[in-house]
Image: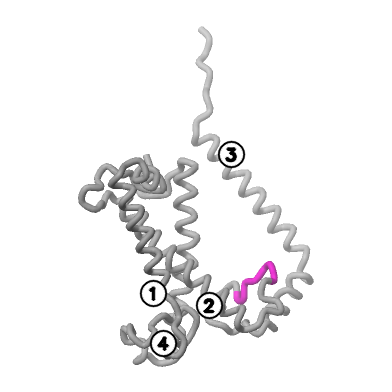
Amino acid sequence: STPARRTSSPFHHHTKFTMKIAVLATLFASAAAFAPASQHAATTALSASPYANEVGVQAPLGLYDPFGLLEGVPQEGFDTLRYIELKHGRVSMLAVVGYLTTAAGIRFPGAGDVPDGVKAFAALANSDDGKNVLLQMTAFFALAEIVNRDIPGTGNEHPGDFRNGALDFGWGKLSDEAKLTKRAIELNNGRAAMMGIAGLVTHEAIGVSVLPGGYLPGQ
């Protein structure tokens, strides 16, 4: 009898893809080993940057600016970039929490039939109640944008400080060293969250789960 033809499994394709990525990474690493002079020059230039000692410049990367976006940028421009980084980090931290919460099956009352993941937006747009929810979300985003801003003359100390002389939560009682530590922690958590939510959404889109039990949101 004719033997059954062996079909390639998704695992087989995934393994081949992983091997290709590993080979490419090895080639890039090998090529980089032959350019020590240029790497040293770039590192020296970054170390000489006026922002080399800013909060968030930490080992092992130090001042990570591979595209030279900070070259010739005044302090005001750096503060704007830092504000944007903080804002994206804070939104991403909320996004990761919300994404994982709904993936765990937790819903508001009456929203039990709304799928989790990115597909929740399309599902909400398909019903009148869902459209009301989207409008409420938009109104909340607008209000948050108005409230969370720096009001000059209220004693704010750095970009992203939105206390505005009202909400302190004990910040004023911390030492300068403790404040720097707290700010660095927020930056690192925000950076991780930006990568995290991007990874979660990407894996949902390609249909590959990274959650426990192989659960894939949006299905």
Label 4, on which residue?
178
Report the amino acid beneath label 3. Lys
Q: Residue at x 54, y 75 (%)?
A: 82
Q: Nearer the viewer, mark 1 or mark 2?
A: 1
The answer for how far apart the CA atoms under marks 4 and 3 are is 48 Å
Label 2, on which residue?
56
Label 1, on which residue?
147
- Could you tell which of marks 2 and 4 lies nearer the N-terminus? 2
Q: Which mark is residue 120?
A: none
Report the amino acid beneath label 2. Gly
Q: Nearer the viewer, mark 1 or mark 3?
A: 1
The answer for how far apart the CA atoms under marks 2 and 4 are is 14 Å
The answer for how far apart the CA atoms under marks 2 and 3 are is 38 Å
Which range of residues does the magenta coloring cover? 62-68
Task: Verify whether residue 66 appears in magenta.
Answer: yes
Label 3, on which residue?
16
